Structure formats: structure tokens, C-alpha cells
Amino acid sequence: MTFSRRDFVSSIALGALGTAAGAPASATEALPKQRMQAQAKPIIVSAGNGYEHLEDAYQYLKGGGDTLEAAIKVVRGPEDDPNDDSVGLGGLPNEEGVVELDASCMHGPTRRAGSAGGVRNIRSMAQLAREVMLHSGHVMLVGEGAERFAVARGFKRQDLLTEESRKVWLLWKEAHADWWGPGVADPRWRERLHDRLKSDEGAAYRQRLQAIAQDLGIDPAVREAAIHKVLFPPTGTIHCSTLAANGDMSGCTTTSGLAWKIPGRLGDSPIIGAGCYTDQDVGSAGATGSGEENIRVAGAHTIVENMRRGMTPFDAGMDALKRIVRNYNGEKDRLLYVDMTYYILRKDGAYAGVSLWTGYEPGRPHTIAVHDGTRRLEKTVSLFEGASQEWPPIVAASKVNL
Ligand code: ASP
């Protein structure tokens, strides 16, 4: 199996902590690992892919820097990294092969918010969300208008599709995969599952993917990983919430959204209250995972409001996850296609990372990166044990040996 750089960093950091990847993470077992004490020092929490970028931001925050600037310093790392294919430069494109990015931010001290969605050719999306907040009378700009606003504000246009991402997109395209048809929330959802491929056909299909990948010149070292991205269209995002010693808080979320999405599709990341929400009287929260599900429960806002009513960060996050479960009447065979992780920071420094499933695949748990003087990566606490599957299912999970 080929590891992306993000997987590699995660496994190194988890290894250093002595936390066995794939170990059960039942809510009760892992609960004590979630910090519950108040503290008067700065703290930053982010999705696991922020781990490498926490140090500078923490030092900046400790030196009295602005909380939103600190959060943007963290997310800029993956945004600028061509090897992180879930955010910014190198993000996996939409179904037409065009990278479209989403981001939002909230600045606690001024109680302001900004967001930009479906933006092409601009890589620093969190910064663009901040520009919308500071230099327009609006909160949200989308598409071409947002791109032109960015250029007017001095951002450089840039082709965000890397050669590697373009080849994986072509592989997906040639495999005739698509996002059209009923989604997992549709009563006809099972139609997507109906033996699209019988097990022997599944093997043949993988062979065909191998052949196309070879034709496309996809490096053998990353060929299996590329096929995996076609069979299980990846999502990926980074959220970061920050708390300064003086109590200021901010948050931001930035993403390339769902791989192979229909052009114009917006997920939760640019939606204030879904992908990101901060009220420094209470706390800050953000999300990665199935954007459509998170929009339906207004996840980040729900969590902050739960904390306002006295819930711990952990309980507040679990409640939001249970609202998603309720939306599916608890049907686990459908929830299997839903992935959601929340990163939660309370104004007293208490924090939690919670997710619906343990990880995307066995041995690859969801993580929250934390810096409060000590930088670390922790496994999130999951509501259900096991790995989620990606939607739409091109090959039923049980029929592929990944
Ligand atoms: N939430 C993002 C979206 O739906 C994707 C992700 O976080 O994986 O666009």
C-alpha cells in the first residue's frame, strides 16, 4: 500500500506517542485522553494534517499574535503543499478536471466572518476568506466573482492541478465513475449498491484500472493509491481553531472538497456554522468529512451552542454526531458511507476530537493535532468502531480486497 505524505506524518507521530493504530477507540476508554481542565496558555487544535505546521503558529500566538492569523498559518501549510491532495495546490479536481476550493473563517475578537466557495485558480483560500471578511461588506463570495475579487486584492492566479492529480482524475474519468444519480440520503440509495460488480467482475475491473493507470503513465509506486482514490473518492480538509492566553479565539476551514464533484458543488467548509463556527464567549469548532451531512446538522454551530448550554466539548461533539445518526434512523448500512470528524476547542482550553467512525480505513485512524506548549497528534474518539466507505460505491466494499 502506498502512503500519502499525510498518512506518513500521521503514522510517525502516532508511533511516537506509542498509540497503536487501529486499536479500539470506544468512547469510554478514550475519554480520559480528552483534556477537560481549564488552562491559561494558548492552544491550537487542528485536523491531523495540520500537525507539521503547528509550531510556528503556536510561537506566533504565544508572542501575542492574532488568533485568526495563527489559524491561517497552520492551514497554509497543507494549502501550499502540492502533495496534500485534499486542500489548495494539488487538490483533487472536480469531474471536469478543474480544482475548485472552499474556505471560511471566523474572527472571535471582532465577531466577524468571511467565506469563499467554488473558487478556481486561487490557492490561499483561508486568506481569501479573511479578505472577504475584511475588505467587502459581505460574508460570502462564490465562483468567478470570488476569483475576480481575489485578483483585485492582489492574489495571483495559478493552475492548481498538479500532474499527479491530473493523472488520477483521468484514471477516474476513464473508469466511467460519476457522482450523478441518487445520493446516500435518497430513499433509492440502494440502487447505487445493486451488484454493480460481482466479485469476479470486481477483480477484472481492478485489472482494467491497473491497465489504464499504466497507459496514463501513473508511477507504479503510487498506482494502487491512485486506484484506491478512484474506487473510494477521497475527501479531505483542514480545520484549525485557536485560543490565545487573553481569551481571544478564531477558527478557519479550507478544502478542495470532494474529489470528482459536480462543478459548483459546495460542501460544508465554506458554510459558516457548518464547517466552521467560533464564538469566543463559548468556543470554536470545525469539521472534516461528508459535507452534505454536516450542513444538514449545522455541525460547528450546533457544537458551540451545545457548549454554551454547559456540555463538555466531547459531549457537544458526540451530540452533533448523533444528530447525523438520527437523520438516517440509525441505519448503519447507510451510515457506513458517512464520514465526519469534529475538532472542538472551548474557551477554557478544554478540547475534543470526535468522529463517526474510527478512520477511513483500518490502521488509518482519524486524528486531531494539538499544540498547547507540547505538540502532539491524538486519535479522535469515535462513536462507531470501524472504517467508513466512500460514496458513491463503485465497487461494493466487500468485493474489493484493499
Ligand atoms: N467536508 C469537505 C467537503 O464536504 C470534505 C472533507 O472534509 O473531507 O467538501
Image (tube, rainbow, N blue to C red):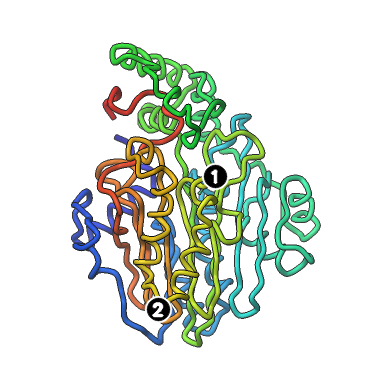
Residue ID at (29%, 34%) = 1
Instruction: For mark 1, give the secondary structure.
Output: loop
Q: Is residue 14 left or right of residue 85?
A: left
Residue ID at (52%, 37%) = 259
Residue 140 is at least partly visible in this image: yes
Question: Up-down: is 260 above or below 378?
Answer: above
Q: Is residue 75 left or right of residue 222?
A: right
Q: Residue lying farthest front?
A: 329
Q: Is residue 253 left or right of residue 226?
A: right
Badge 1 density bin: few <14, some 14–19, many ≥20, Cα 10 Å: many
Q: Earlier in the sequence, mark 2 or mark 1?
A: 1
* Residue 146 spot, x, y in % from top left: 74, 52
Give the label on residue 142, or none: none
Residue type at the position of mark 2:
Gly
Badge 2 density bin: few <14, some 14–19, many ≥20, Cα 10 Å: many
Question: Up-down: is 354 above or below 333?
Answer: below
* Residue 136 spot, x, y in % from top left: 78, 65
Residue ID at (18%, 52%) = 23
Residue type at the position of mark 1:
Gly
* Residue 97 spot, x, y in % from top left: 61, 31
Dot 2 corresponds to which residue? 349
Residue 261 falls in which quadrant of the image?
top right
* Residue 32 spot, x, y in % from top left: 23, 70
Residue ID at (66%, 41%) = 159
Label 1 CB-ligand 1 distance < 8 A = yes
Q: Quadrant of the C terminus?
A: top left
Residue 83 is at least partly visible in this image: no
Question: Up-down: is 358 above or below 377?
Answer: above
Taking depth in this image into account, of 333 and 327 the one nearest to the observer is 327
Instruction: For mark 2, give the secondary structure.
Output: loop
Number of numbered discs present?
2
Dot 1 corresponds to which residue? 257
